[in-house]
Amino acid sequence: MSQALTNESAQPLVIVGSGLAGYTVAREVRKLDKHREIVLVTKDDGASYSKPMLSNACSLGKSPEALANFDAAAMESQLGIKLITHSPVEKIDLGGQFIEIGKRTQGFSQLVLALGADPRRPKLPGTGAEDILCINDLTDYYDFRRKLDSAKSILILGAGLIGVEFANDLATAGYFVSLVDPAPTPLSRMLPSEAGEVLAGALVECGVKLYLGDVVMRMERAQSGYKLLLESGVSIAADLVISAIGLTPRIELARSAGIQVGKGIRTDKFCRTSAANVFALGDCAEIDGKVQPFVLPIMHAARALGSTLCGDNASVNFPVMPVVVKTPAMPTVLVHTGNDRGHWTVVEPMTGGVKALCTDEESGQVIGFSLLGTATSEKADLVRMMSNS
């Protein structure tokens, strides 16, 4: 196999991954350097689209085709980059500073890993388990919408962020939706139980059938669709089954190259990995000890990394970043603390909403909040208060 060129200065910046993280880094670098050679390698077709739109496109009447903003050729032209599509990276050679793409190699002066994450698949017994759908990208969504054309009932595994958004979306679009989760309330890792109960009630009113505190034990193919048996003994029929039980950062490519990994590809606050000239961000990265697979953290990390790649080291300083949950049945905005010392308190009951604050048990400072319904109007004030504390 031929080696990459040895003259590092002659090599381009190489970005692996064409999701939000990869394209945003390319855009930030191009703002600062109009002439630098940038090569973006992706296993996908290189289309640019808004991934968060996948979980609410159905009720909005948007087709998969309408979600793709620009194709690969348009992105090449916009950003002045070279795109290598449908090309999974198989190996990183740190000594030679090149990546292997099939039988080809591509040298790099700097390498950015924006690999994303894989959906977790439930391990269930039964003849139908292999048919569970995971919707993690636009290709998955095309497949889902083709199958949805002949479906009336959908069962969703997992009442986390993606699960509740898909449930609300599909129920609003007129489908019979069942939502199953072992936790007693939706968004149990992000909302206090009182707020979760309010969200649950809104989903039920929207037409979602909730099976909370329960788990699927078997999934069998039926004459039409599937039959799922829950731990409680309840049997549910569904035409399609979607898994929304979480994501696993893609770390194997980095691990096999000897780059340090944990929950994600470990980086410092400058997005630098343990390997020289190799950086990581997005769903695959554990930046300064945290994996944050949300839009705002990715945008902030990409902006800082763009400066660093152009020679002006900029640390990633995450501000207060609210997460907007796309559940029109009960609009929800939250700041997830990830702090075991936090204590949740419902501040005051209000008509059509819930406001809850999470305070640090030692300092008493507000470190998170959840706002539902009419309480979402207080988002800006709370963000300002937390930012100034």
Image (spheres, rainbow, N blue to C red):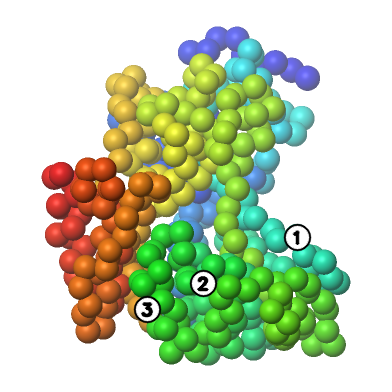
In this rendering, the label closer to the viewer, 2 or 3: 2
Amino acid carrying label 1: it is Lys
* CA–CA distance in space, label 3 to label 1: 31 Å
Classify 54 as above or below 291: below
Report x, y in % for residue 254. Answer: 62, 30
Q: Dividing the picture into quarters, in which one does residue 244 lie?
A: bottom right
Q: To which residue does mark 1 refer? A: 123
Classify 323 as above or below 9: below
Q: Mark 3 vs mark 1: which is more N-terminal? A: 1
Q: To which residue does mark 3 refer? A: 198
For the N terminus, the quadrant is: top right
Category of crowding for the residue at label 2, using alpha-carbon neighbours closer than 10 angstroms: few (below 14), some (14–19), many (at least 20)? some
Report x, y in % for residue 124. Answer: 77, 65
Report x, y in % for residue 28. Answer: 35, 37
Element assignment for label 3: helix
Residue at position x 21%, y 48% in the image: 364
Q: To which residue does mark 2 refer? A: 184
In this rendering, the label closer to the viewer, 2 or 1: 2
Report x, y in % for residue 146. Answer: 66, 76
Amino acid carrying label 3: it is Val
Report the number of numbered marks: 3
Q: Is residue 200 visible?
A: yes
| Residue 48 vs residue 312, the one in the foreground | 312
Category of crowding for the residue at label 1, using alpha-carbon neighbours closer than 10 angstroms: few (below 14), some (14–19), many (at least 20)? few
